[in-house]
């Protein structure tokens, strides 16, 4: 017999997706009413295919495949470049002073002329002795700030979403990375319209009702500092200590960690299969507020993945109250069913907490 | 400290209504987008004032205040008249054979020429030796069936709701009653637009998250039969026994029952105050799907309350899954806080169960 939580996980999938759980792919843009009625109000994701998405008709689609266009247009711009040794920023890492425990590691952020930032992204490499991964992923409305010179290349908002939601995006962010960068599981308190311009983004998605499967725990905050002289990273804890609630699960553990992670995070690994979707150049993903998501990317031929995402304010309504209630309940002791799953099985750690407004990304 | 359930009850109120919990009163009809965005998607009720509601411009507003118009228009119609000894149909009543327990009592339903039905409503009285309360409250799309001759007097749907929801009403019902009829607490799996034509309806409303406060229990189904010869009612159990899940709480208990009910249903009586709203002639209430509601009425000068309600299909989405999960949890052992409440304090009984699709009314 299933526990109430397991029943909830299954029922949300059945109600939202029917008997063959997969993300809708729309071939014409939704009307504002259709978007509100069938997706936003139901907290249900979809992909707008390239033929239907306005991104295909953005100047960006043609212009941004030229790196020299980008370098030239942003030649006077200084941007926030995020550097990590592993490609994992805002992610769980080994604690700097106690190797048997974990911390929440943020990237070294360095104000860099745009052209040098692109060089860094293209020359990123992970190396046991040195190396770095560079990612332009500042999430402070950067597209309208640091990258203002590119503003004319994309729509300033997603028309049907703006009309449905009744307000302009709260933030628009630009993301330029490569195949080494990965964003760990988290959720955002925004309705997210995520447009890929070049390359591909690979999302793993779980509905908010799966919160116990993410093993959200409080990790001490730490930040990388990178020395250009030595080419070395140092990870330092914040002082005073601040705990960041973050998802513990990694959907793609290394083969040597897989067994350990499956036994540490059984609700994730034995529960219903997460949704995996690839968003290609020209496509737009509607990623509903509060959905957990993990993101990897495949670069275009020159080694870049470029995306623009629009964050619209979410409604803090009865769904949000239900989520908070759910999250306040203890997790089930252990899974009652053990459906085996194919590839993507993984993960790590111990103590419940809340993922607050600060936990925002992609 | 509040329990998670108590926190949920309060948070839904704060998120939905802000710091001064009261039902919005709109003075212009919402656009379909506005209705979807601010009300339907948020599961939030409102009242459309008479000046804004189309009901004021319905022929029904003028025509139905003439009883002779109604008698004449429906002179060939036979209608389903509901008779009870107390004015409480589809309600908890004393068990016919074991006086210390309770049952779920449905009305005696009698096919009656419309004119005789009106006579019965106007001559209803509750009497210790005899008497009856008559109510036209058939909920099977009766306005488009039994009362088809009146169809031209009202809109066949609520335009902005139809456009928002994307389909016509699943059912339209006519209600003709008097001040003695009362509808007990229940919820419907419909989005409900409730238009009062003459008289007033008094609603007590609680959000779906308050489900544990309703003490939904399984009661054996019973039906009244009324003998016109003797003027007596007999309440008979269904055979084989069928249990109907129903709310146990009465918001307006008699003074002699008040203390007993307060101690039997402490979560209702000590929890957050229910919403009380009066819907007047010409006004429309949007009663969101899954909200618990109790209804009383004040008649117009000739002793009638007339209303038309439109039931639109609800979306069975993540909110519905959250509700089912919530309902599957055991209630808290007893309230941790005991806020005293003013007037409307009440209630009765013991064993959890589900309020299924059958539990629909007003």
Image (cartoon, coloured by chain):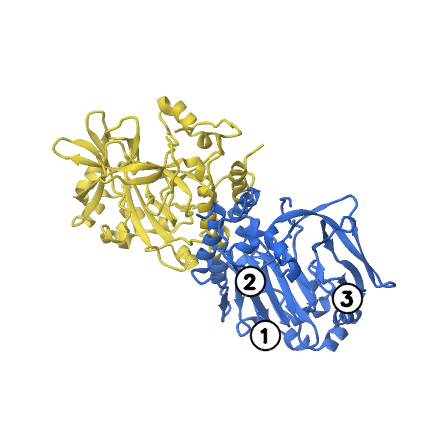
Chain colours: A yellow, B blue
Callouts 1 and 3 on one subunit: yes
The residue pinned by badge 1 equals B56
Say whether disc 2 or disc 3 marks the residue closer to the N-terminus.
3
> Looking at this view, is B176 or A69 the one in front?
B176
Q: Are marks 2 and 3 in contact (CB under 8 Å)?
A: no
Q: Which mark is residue B94?
A: none
Residue corresponding to mark 2: B286
- Are labels 2 and 3 on one chain? yes
Asked if residue A300 shows in the view, the reply is no
For the C terminus of chain B, the quadrant is bottom right
Residue B56, given in percent of the width and then of the height, sits at: 59, 74
Q: Which comes before the other along the chain, label 1 or label 3?
A: 1
- The chain containing the residue under callout 1 comes to B
Q: State the SS at label 3.
A: loop
Residue B63 appears in view: yes
Tell me the CA gap for discs 2 and 3.
35 Å
Q: CA distance from mark 1 to mark 2?
A: 16 Å
Q: Is residue B71 above or below residue B94?
A: below
Instruction: Return the chain for callout 2.
Output: B
The mark lying in front, picked from 1 and 3, is 3
The residue identified by callout 3 is B127
Which one is nearer the viewer's eye here, B243 or A35? B243
What's the distance in space between the residues labelled 1 and 3, CA to CA? 37 Å
Q: Sequence order check: which comes first, mark 1 or mark 2?
A: 1
Which mark is in front, 2 or 3?
3
Percent x, y of residue A358: 32, 46
Single out the mark in the foreground, 1 or 2. 2
Judge by depth and name the residue closer to the eye, B301 or A188: B301
């Amino acid at each position: 017999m299933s526990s109430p939580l397991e029943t909830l996980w299954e029922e949300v999938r059945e109600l939202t997706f029917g008997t063959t759980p997969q993300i809708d792919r729309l071939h014409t843009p939704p009307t504002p009413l259709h978007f509100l009625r069938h997706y936003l109000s139901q907290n249900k994701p979809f992909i707008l295919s390239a033929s239907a998405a306005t991104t295909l008709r953005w100047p960006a689609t043609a212009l941004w495949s030229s790196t020299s266009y980008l370098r030239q247009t942003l030649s006077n711009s200084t941007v926030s470049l995020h550097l990590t040794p592993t490609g994992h920023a805002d992610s769980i890492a080994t604690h700097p002073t106690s190797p048997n425990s974990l911390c929440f590691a943020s990237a070294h952020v360095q104000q860099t002329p745009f052209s040098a930032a692109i060089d860094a992204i293209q020359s990123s490499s992970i190396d046991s002795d040195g190396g770095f991964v560079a990612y332009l992923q500042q999430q402070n409305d950067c597209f309208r700030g640091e990258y203002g010179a590119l503003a004319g290349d994309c729509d300033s908002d997603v028309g049907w979403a703006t009309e449905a939601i009744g307000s302009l995006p709260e933030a628009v962010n630009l993301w330029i990375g490569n195949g080494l960068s990965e964003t760990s599981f988290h959720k955002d308190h925004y309705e997210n319209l995520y447009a890929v311009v070049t390359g591909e983004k690979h999302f793993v998605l779980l509905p908010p009702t799966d919160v116990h499967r993410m093993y959200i725990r409080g990790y001490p905050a730490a930040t990388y500092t990178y020395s250009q002289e030595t080419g070395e990273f140092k990870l330092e804890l914040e002082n005073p200590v601040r705990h960041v609630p973050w998802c513990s699960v990694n959907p793609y553990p290394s083969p040597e960690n897989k067994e350990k992670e499956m036994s540490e995070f059984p609700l994730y690994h034995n529960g219903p299969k997460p949704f995996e979707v690839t968003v290609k150049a020209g496509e737009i993903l509607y990623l509903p507020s509060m959905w957990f998501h993990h993101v990897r990317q495949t670069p275009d031929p020159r080694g870049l993945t470029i995306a623009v995402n629009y964050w619209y304010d979410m409604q803090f309504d009865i769904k949000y109250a239900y989520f908070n209630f759910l999250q306040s309940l203890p997790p089930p002791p252990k899974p009652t069913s053990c459906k085996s799953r194919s590839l993507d099985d993984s993960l790590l750690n111990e103590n419940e907490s809340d993922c607050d407004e600060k936990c925002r990304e992609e």
